[in-house]
Image: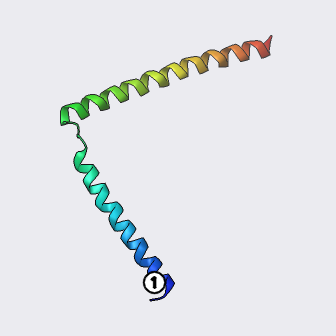
């Protein structure tokens, strides 16, 4: 076998080993229940909305403040 053939075989074996290990690790994962998933999603959406609102308020304040400073 040529050297490039051996390299290809090693790559295929490495990928195969990686995928087997991924499968084993995914079996160890504790997946959330449907109710937990809905609750976590709701918490994330509310948090994102609150942070976006906070950033909007701060941005609006600075916008008004800079306009006032540049006007006067």
Quadrant location of residue 64?
A: top right
Report the front residue among 22 and 35. 22
In this picture, is 54 found above or below 10? above
What residue lies at 55% left-to-right and 17% top-to-bottom? 57
**Residue found at the far bottom of this picture:** 1
Label 1 neighbour load within 10 Å: few <14, some 14-19, many 20+: few
Q: Which residue: 36% across, 29% down?
A: 44
Residue 26 lies, with reference to residue 38, above or below; the image says: below
Q: Where is residue 10 shown, x and y percent of the image?
A: 42, 74
Q: Nearer the viewer, residue 64 or 19?
A: 19
- Which percent across, then down, holds residue 6? 45, 81
* Quarter assignment of residue 1: bottom left
Locate residue 18 relative to residue 53 in the image: left or right: left
The residue positioned 26% from the left and 28% from the top of the image is: 39
Q: Is residue 52 above or below residue 24?
A: above
The residue identified by callout 1 is: 5
């Amino acid at each position: 076998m040529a050297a490039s053939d051996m390299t290809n075989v090693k790559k295929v074996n490495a990928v195969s080993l990686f995928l087997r290990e991924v499968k084993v690790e995914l079996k160890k994962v504790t997946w959330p229940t449907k109710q937990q998933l809905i609750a976590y999603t709701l918490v994330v959406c509310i948090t994102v909305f609150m942070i976006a609102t906070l950033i909007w308020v701060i941005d609006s304040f600075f916008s008004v403040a800079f306009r006032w400073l540049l006007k006067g």
